[in-house]
Image: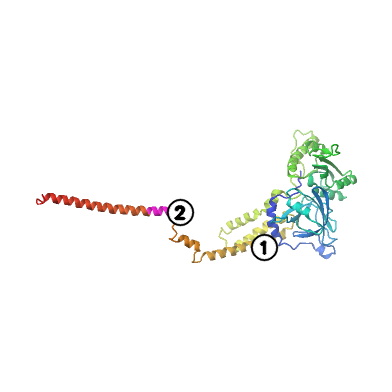
Amino acid sequence: MTIIQRTIPKAIKVAGVAGFAGLGIYCTKQFSTAFAESNEPKPVFSGLGFTTLRLQSTKTVNHNTKRLVFEYPNESARSGLTLTSALLAITHPEGSWLPTIRPYTPISDLDEPGRIELMVKQYPDGKASGYLHSLKPGDSLRFATSLKGYQWKQNEFSHAYLLAGGAGITPIYQLIKGILKNPQDRTKLTLVFGVNSEEDLLLKEELDRYATEFPERFNYIYTVSRPKEENSSYRTGYIDEELLRSTFRESTQNTKVFICGPPAMEDSLRYLTCESLVYRYASDLKSQTTVPGTAKMSGQTKSLYPEPNVLTSSLKVGAVTGLRSNILKLHYEDKATPKQRAYVSALSGGVAGGAVTRLMGGRLVPGLVVFSLLGYVGQSSYNAIDTWQMENANTTSKPFLQRMADSKWIPLKSLSDDDYRGILNEKVLSIEAEIALIDDKIGELEKLKTSGLESGNSDPAAK
């Protein structure tokens, strides 16, 4: 089973800001020599880097969804995106110190010249979606790199099942359009689209047209959980096990399942889809005494966009820290010079940075070079600051507060337990010495008294 992730994990909000700040240095895009030698304009979203587009028009779809059309700087330019790609939009919501980065899937033809169209649903607490809904024609929006997802190959599967919920229809729609546009691709498609109400059936006109145009290759089921009309023509309810089992009527051999929707829906459908596929698979193979596991089905570990755990751990750049510390410990025995530390930071930053760039669909070598420079410059800056602090710390004159704390005129300065023990021991020794002197005086007086009594007893005159 394949899971399509429409949104990127929240961890990318923090890691993405730092990551794309570094990637801003990598503003020179990489293009092939074919574009340089021809008159065809360069693709708009090739490689890593920032691209600013002007909003051409907006169209309200329903109470919380808009279609936004952005124009390219060159009217004959094309996007350069591949099927199952998303764009990272950089927004600056009012009252927010840091930019917000969110992925959005284009719904227009990826090879359409001059323009690209997004469909954006506004959420109650959505900073990015609220910002996009506030844009007016003529405003500009900056995009970072594109996210390349699952690499679709024509005729790799005989049938693909597409399960969408709410705004999760946008990546599913891009996949449907790309497959049906290709006359060489004979993959059959079945869409199950679940929404809350009838007005949430986004892209319905386009989907109806595809079903009419490709009746043997594409069919769909709409299910509405809370229909506003009493006699609704759509199926009522959620995407449940009963619906899935009735949908998966054909053999599950050489099939693919894509899921995209709210997190709660995706979590529940992961289990239900596997149960339904295993049930269908067991029905196809009644002669077997055991039910095969889901691993028998192809594409179990793939995903449209990078898996959240892989992408999050990469953007945390844990590899940089681990690789750097191991090199310093094993090779230099934690006794590296500042120059050696800068060299190690450049090496580990390049390796991890190249891996991050490759996971996000970019080229390995440019990412390696950029993050190597960042690692070297960052470590060199740290070394310079550390050296300056050490030089100032070795001055003979102590800071004013330190000199005041060491002064004997401060009666209430803080002392440690050892200081108090030392003072008490000195006092005890002094008292013991005074007691010894007193004992000596008392002894001398007793001797004088004793000697006086003896002399008086022996003198007759005294009697």
Q: Earlier in the sequence, mark 2 or mark 1?
A: 1
Quadrant in the rendering for residue 193: top right
Q: Residues within 10 Å of mark 2 (few under 14, many from 20)?
A: few
Where does residue 87 sit, x and y in percent of width and height?
77, 54
The answer to whether residue 133 is visible is yes
Q: Is residue 423 magenta?
A: yes
Type of residue at label 1? Leu
Q: Point out the frontmost of discs 2 and 1.
A: 2
Examine the rendered structure and indicate whether residue 6 appears above or below residue 285. Answer: below
- How far apart marks 2 and 1 lie (CA) works out to 47 Å
Residue at the disc numbered 1: 373
Give SS at disc 1.
helix
Residue drawn at 32 percent across, 52 percent down: 432
Q: Give the quarter of the figure containing the N terminus.
A: top right
Question: What x and y, as percent, mark residue 242?
Answer: 79, 35
Instruction: Give the dominant element type of the magenta stretch: helix, strand or loop.
Output: helix
Name the one closer to the observer, 428 or 10: 428
Q: Which residue is mark 2?
A: 416
